[in-house]
Amino acid sequence: MKKIDEIKSYLENKDTFEIIQYISEKFGSKAAFSTSLSIEDQVITHMLAAINSKIKIFTLDTGRLPNETYSLIEKTKERFNINIEIYFPDYRQVEKMVNEKGINLFYESIENRKECCRIRKIVPLKRALKKMKVWITGLRREQSITRQNIELIEYDYSYKVIKLNPLYKWTENEVWDYIRKHNIPYNSLYDKNYLSIGCAPCTRPVQPGEDIRAGRWWWENPNTKECGLHIKQ
């Protein structure tokens, strides 16, 4: 798309802060940042707060998040004096799914797990991105085999928005260096070897030698380890 190519060309030699600042100035409240409170997302939140951005910051509460994540939501709001909008799944869809397939249906099959992710994450995300022009994420290429080809800026046909991945080239060490330099609050589960944190039943600590996403849906093949939020069409 011509518009994306123009933006990409302009941002090509800009650093991450300049990229986020440009998107904020150009799109303002028509841009939205989805945070899962990961270390990557905390970096972006810090930058958005620093420029006093009008970009909407939101998170998805699936109803099964760890307590540590809920605590961090409040701590982050207080630290940066920002509002984080919270989107919930439709209780009727959740009730129907759980009553038909069980509370922990995701362990039974990939199909069940993806259905759970669809109801608890994808449907609320579509509501959050409605009327938005830009979706900002904390995705990095280094995170997993399913993310190795992401670009700085893309068009997401599923949600019909421009998708910005400002940290796409950052390494894990660079993220942690930024967190420590600016004393940014992070999820205490990282200190217990949780390297990718999602819903409590689908997240475990990572063992020595395992990759970053090994603790997510560990019973599945690495090639299927996405909830569906970031699948390219």
Image (cartoon, rainbow, N blue to C red):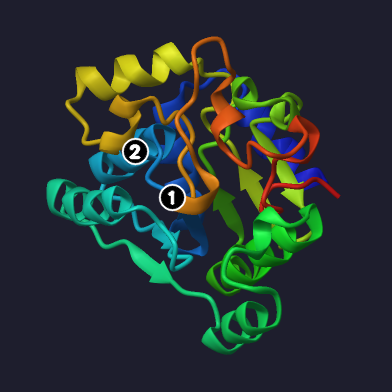
Q: Position of residue 220 (x, y in %)?
A: 73, 39
Q: Is residue 92 above or below residue 35?
A: below
Looking at the image, residue 4 sits to the left or right of residue 54; the answer is right
Q: Position of residue 159 (x, y in %)?
A: 71, 62
The answer to which quarter of the image holds residue 197 is top left
- Which residue is located at x 78 percent, y 34 percent? 221
Q: Residues within 10 Å of mark 2 (few under 14, many from 20)?
A: many
Residue that numbered label 1 is attached to: 35
Looking at the image, residue 44 sits to the left or right of residue 76; the answer is right
Q: Which mark is first along the chain, 1 or 2? A: 1
State how far apart marks 2 and 1 are (Cα).
8 Å
Asked if residue 23 shows in the view, the reply is yes
Count the marks: 2
Q: Is residue 82 above or below residue 212?
A: below
Which label sits on residue 136? Answer: none
Which kind of residue does numbered mark 1 sit on? Answer: Thr
* Pointer 2 with pointer 1, Cβ within 8 A: yes
Which kind of residue does numbered mark 2 sit on? Answer: Gln
Looking at the image, residue 183 sits to the left or right of residue 17; the answer is left
User: Relative to the observer, which residue lies in front, 212 or 134?
Assistant: 212
Secondary structure of the residue carrying tag 2 is helix
Residue that numbered label 2 is attached to: 42
User: Relative to the observer, which residue lies in front, 30 or 163?
Assistant: 163
Q: Position of residue 47 (x, y in %)?
A: 32, 36
User: Relative to the observer, which residue lies in front, 78 or 101?
Assistant: 101
- Which residue is located at x 49 percent, y 57 percent? 32
Asked if residue 157 shows in the view, the reply is no
Q: Position of residue 92 (x, y in %)?
A: 58, 89
Q: Residues within 10 Å of mark 1 (few under 14, many from 20)?
A: many
- Which residue is located at x 22 percent, y 53 percent? 71
Residue at the bottom extreme, as displayed:
92
Secondary structure of the residue carrying tag 1 is loop
